[in-house]
């Protein structure tokens, strides 16, 4: 295998190392007080994708209400249940109904 071919294989590794170098002290965590306040408001502690920073996933005002498109909800209309999302958490993989009522699947990190 020539030098150029080995170099191409190292590019993804180099990119991964550069991204990893951007995280200085590890993921940001909520303090115990912030966690308690979050739960008291009806939220839960969630993790934000690749950054792994903790945040409070706050409850939505229309949680569980029936919907047929995203514009029916403050956040998203969940495709599987056809109800408005219960909390503000845009991370992870999920399916939702867009503004025309079509199913859209997405993964957000």
Image (spheres, helix red, strand yellow):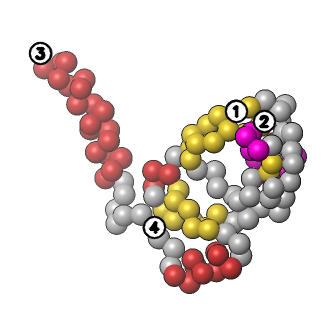
Residue placed under numbered mark 1 in the picture:
104
Residue bearing the label numbered 2 = 98
Note whether 46 is above or below 109 in the view shown.
below
Residue 45 visible? The answer is: yes
Of labels 4 and 1, the one closer to you: 1
Res 28 label: 4
Q: Tell me the quadrant of the picture where the N terminus can be found.
A: top left
Q: Which residue is mark 3?
A: 1
Q: Mark 3 or mark 2: which is in front?
A: 2
User: Which residue is found at the position 86% from the left and 53% from the top?
Assistant: 65
Q: Are marks 4 and 3 in contact (CB under 8 Å)?
A: no
Inspect the magenta stretch and tell me whether residue 79 lies in it.
Answer: yes
Which residue is at the far front?
A: 81
Q: Residues within 10 Å of mark 3 (few under 14, many from 20)?
A: few
Front tag of 3 and 1: 1
Q: Residue at x 36, y 54 (%)?
A: 22
Q: Are marks 1 and 2 in contact (CB under 8 Å)?
A: yes
């Amino acid at each position: 295998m020539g030098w150029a071919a080995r170099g191409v294989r190292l590019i993804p590794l180099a990119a991964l190392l550069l991204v990893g170098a951007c995280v200085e002290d590890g993921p940001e965590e909520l303090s115990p007080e912030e966690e308690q306040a979050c739960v008291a408001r009806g939220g839960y502690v969630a993790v934000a994708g690749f950054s792994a920073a903790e945040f409070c996933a706050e409850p939505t005002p229309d949680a569980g209400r029936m919907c047929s498109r995203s514009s029916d909800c403050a956040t998203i209309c969940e495709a599987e249940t056809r109800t408005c999302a219960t909390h503000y958490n845009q991370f992870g993989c999920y399916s939702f109904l867009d503004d025309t009522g079509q199913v859209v699947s997405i993964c957000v990190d």
